[in-house]
Image (tube, rainbow, N blue to C red):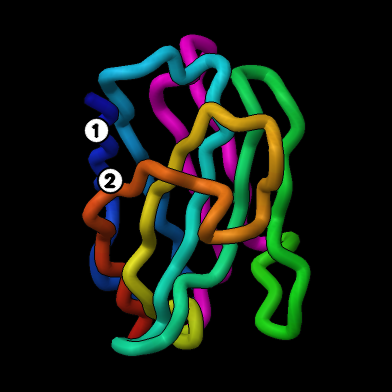
Amino acid sequence: QVHLVESGGGLVQPGGSLRLSCAASGGTFSTYKMAWFRRQAPGKEREFVAATRWSGGLTYIANDADSVKGRFTISRDNAGNTVHLQMNSLKPEDTAVYYCAADPSRVGIYGRNDYNYWGQGTQVTVSS
């Protein structure tokens, strides 16, 4: 059974950095796409943050109005079982619960429905 466990969240001041990690087990993750989503408020939909295809593959970063592009970087270890999200220059609007997601399908990358496996989430709070 696939299991995803996030870690690394916490309280950080604006302008600070955090590194989230997601440890995956129960599957051959070197062939999975893995991603980070976040939910900024209760009742709000999870939004795409970043994703990476199988180990050593392409990476994708959100590029919308509240863009994390240029501040966040996604990476994964060579075995593909752990994915990281390096978050720099954090802003209060980055406050959210961050979720790790994974899926073996090669179809889709940006949508919530593109992923069947989810972690429980880790809280990131950016505040002075």
Left or right, residue 101 beside residue 47? left
Taking the spot 24% from the left edge, 33% from the top edge, the residue there is: 3
Give the side of residue 87 with respect to residue 127, left or right: right
Q: Nearer the viewer, residue 119 or 76?
A: 119
Image quadrant where one finds the N terminus: top left
Residue 128 in sight: no
User: In which quarter of the view is residue 26 placed?
Assistant: top left
Q: Residues within 10 Å of mark 2 (few under 14, many from 20)?
A: many
> For the residue marked with disc 2, what is the amino acid?
Glu
| Residue ID at (41%, 75%) | 39
The numbered disc on residue 3 is 1
121 or 45: nearer the viewer: 45
List x then y, in percent, for residue 73. Answer: 62, 48
Q: Which mark is residue 6?
A: 2
State the extent of the magenta-drawn residues as a range. 71-91
Q: Mark 2 or mark 1, which is nearer to you?
A: 1
User: Gap in Å between the C-alphas at discs 2 and 1?
Assistant: 10 Å
Residue 82 placement, left or right of 3: right
Name the spot of residue 83 as percent of width and height, x first: 46, 34
Q: What amino acid is found at the position of numbered circle 1 in the picture?
A: His
Name the spot of residue 96 as percent of width and height, x first. 37, 76
10 Å crowding of disc 1: few (<14), some (14-19), many (20+): some
Q: Residue at the spot x=40%, y=21% of the render?
A: 81
User: Does the magenta-highlighted stretch encompass residue 117?
Assistant: no
Q: Could you say whether the residue bearing mark 2 is in a helix, strand or loop?
A: strand
- Residue 53 drawn above or below residue 19: above
At x 54% / y 71%, what residue is drawn? 47
Which of the 4 image quadrants contains residue 52? top right
